[in-house]
Amino acid sequence: MTYTIEDEYIELYKLIKLLDLVDSGGQAKQLIEDELVYRNGEIETRKRAKIRPGETIHIGEVTIKTV
């Protein structure tokens, strides 16, 4: 899937929640804490990591490309 970032960046846990991949922000944070989220091919453990256009996020079978 593709997500268009309207501002300079979006925080990682907010992106996950916004795309309805989880039911709550707390669940999004738990996914990140459990090292299940990859940013540009590397595990991302910062819940508030600033995701900018051009990055790729992988969560299980889901791939998010930001533009």
Image (cartoon, rainbow, N blue to C red):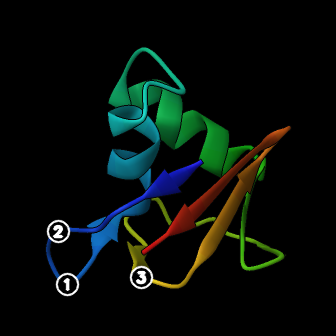
Q: Residue furthest left?
A: 7
Mark closer to the chain start, 3 or 2: 2
- Marks 3 and 2 sit apart, C-alpha to C-alpha, by 9 Å
Q: Which residue is mark 3?
A: 53
Other-residue count near label 2 (Cα within 10 Å), few / some / many at <14 / 14–19 / ≥20: few
Give left or right: position of 43 versus 29.
right
Amino acid, disc 1: Glu
For residue 50, which quarter of the picture? bottom left
Name the residue rendered at 39%, 50% in the picture.
15
> Residue 6: which disc?
2
- Secondary structure of residue under mark 2: loop
Task: Determine whether label 3 and label 2 are within 8 Å by CB.
Answer: no
Near-viewer residue (25 or 20): 20
- Secondary structure of residue under mark 3: loop
Give left or right: position of 31 versus 12.
right
Name the residue rendered at 33%, 37% in the picture.
18
Mark nearer the viewer, 1 or 2: 2
Task: Determine whether label 1 and label 2 are within 8 Å by CB.
Answer: no
Vertically, is 22 above or below 45?
above
Other-residue count near label 3 (Cα within 10 Å), few / some / many at <14 / 14–19 / ≥20: some
Task: Determine whether label 3 and label 1 are within 8 Å by CB.
Answer: no
Residue 3 percent location from the top left of the image: 42, 56
Near-viewer residue (7 or 29): 7
Residue 9 percent location from the top left of the image: 27, 77
Name the residue rendered at 63%, 65% in the picture.
45
Position of the C terminus by quadrant: bottom left
- Secondary structure of residue under mark 1: loop
